[in-house]
Each structure stands twice: as C-alpha cells, then as structure tokens.
Amino acid sequence: MNKLSLLVAAFSTSMLTLLSGCGGETIIDKIDEGEVDITFVNSLDDMSNFHLKRNDILRKSDVDNLFEDKYSIVSDVEKNSASTSYRYRYSLIENSIHVGVIDSLNLSQSAHTNHTLSNKHQYWAIAWHNGNDYAMTSIKKAPSNQSGVYKIRVFTHQDLSFTLNGVAQNNKIQAGKVTDALSITQCADGLIIDDNPIDLCSGDFGQSYLVIADATGLRLLLPE
C-alpha cells in the first residue's frame, strides 16, 4: 500500500470515529431526529381518548387505523381537562402526523386532523364540538408573558362576539381558530365572550394563557 492509500484509509477511519457516538449512533442520525411536546386538550362533553400516528403521505387510507390500540397515547381524559405533556420523537423527513380523539365510553364518536410538525416546538391538540360533531385542531403553543397584564389567546367552539377591556370588538372569534395574543387588564370582566364574562382570576398577572370557550362561557384556562 502506497503512502496516498495509507493517508486515505487513516482519514476515513478518523471521520467514522468522529461521526460515531455511543452504541454506533452517528451525528448524522441525531441531526435527522426531531422531537416535540404535545398536550392533549379535551374540551368535549365526554371523557375521551387521544391517538397519534405518523402520516404516511403515500397511502391514502393511512388514517383508517388511527384508532387502533397501538396508536393510543392517553386514555380517559376527563371533559374540560388536559393531559400532561407528551414527548413525541420522529424522523425529520417524516414530520407529518395524524392526531385523533374518540369518546372513551362507546368508542363511537371521533375526529382527527393532520399536522406538520416543527422540531423543538410545543403543541396543543384540542378536541372540541363543531355543532353536534367532534372536531380536532392542533396549534403551536405561544407563550407571551408580559408584566402587569394577562396575555391570552382565545379558541372557541362557535363564531362568537367578544368585548375586550370594556370595548366591543368588531370581529367575531372564529370557531376552531385561535386568536392572536390579547392583553387583559381586569381578570373578572376584562374579557366577555358572547355576553359571558370570562373569569381569569385563577391565573396570574404577567402570565399567558389559552382560553377555550363556547356560547355558555369558559371551558378551560390553560397556561401557555
């Protein structure tokens, strides 16, 4: 073996050592991995189960088996409550998922949505009522803490009018969509949705929250 061949062999060995970690895992492998945190929110009237699976975009019927047991993430989430955060790891080239909800008692009502993930972000996966049907929406968490005020985003089950700090707003909150961050100065009546004062006093000034409401009033107040 000539000197050039020896140098090439030595360089190749050095690069393999550099790229390899414990157990043979390589830096390239780690670069290709992503992870997100997902909190499952049940704003339905029923105890519910949540499921998640990778979205195989090459298979049109891929979502059909979403509610098999092997894709169950969290079960028996009480109505108007949220799960603890779930860490989901995935390949960055497979960053599309199906997220679904199904009622725990009869396993007869369900809904699902697809979502494309962004690495290192945190998400809300929200189950809600779209009329008589279940619906599922996934959104990124968006903390916006600001000293001296409540910062909130609002998510509603219906298109609803609202009053902010005593001023009636021209636009309605659209069902199934989250508002931009709003600043509230009075916790008891700084936010009124469809004539229902939304009590934020259980929260803390300077913190940010996701408010989930319907035509009857507040369902959930969740720290962002």
Image (spheres, grey):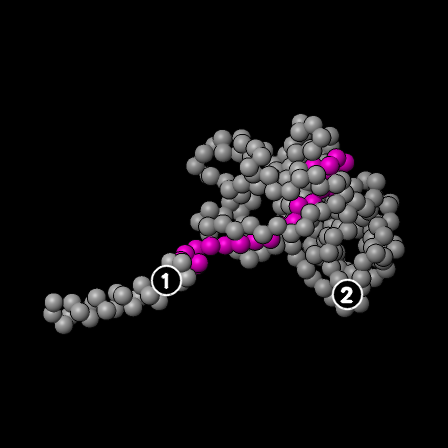
Magenta region: 25-48
Which circle, 1 or 2, is nearer the viewer?
1
Q: Which residue is mark 2?
A: 206
Q: Residue at 75% across / 41% down in the picture?
A: 78
Q: Which residue is mark 1?
A: 20
Q: Quadrant of residue 51?
A: top right
Q: In the rendered view, does 155 fall on the left or right side of 98?
A: right
Give the residue drawn at x 67%, y 27%.
108
First in sequence: mark 1 vs mark 2:
1
The percent position of residue 185, horizontal first and vertical second, equals: 83, 62
Query: Residue 11's spot in the image, x, y percent?
Result: 25, 68
**Residue 18 x %, y %:** 35, 67
Q: CA distance from mark 1 to mark 2?
A: 45 Å
Q: Is residue 133 visible?
A: no
SS at badge 2: loop
Structural crowding at the residue carrying mark 1, measured as other residues with C-alpha within 10 Å and reported as few (<14), some (14–19) or many (≥20): some
Left or right position of 68 against 41: left
Q: Amino acid at mark 2?
A: Gly
- What SS does tag 1 mark? loop
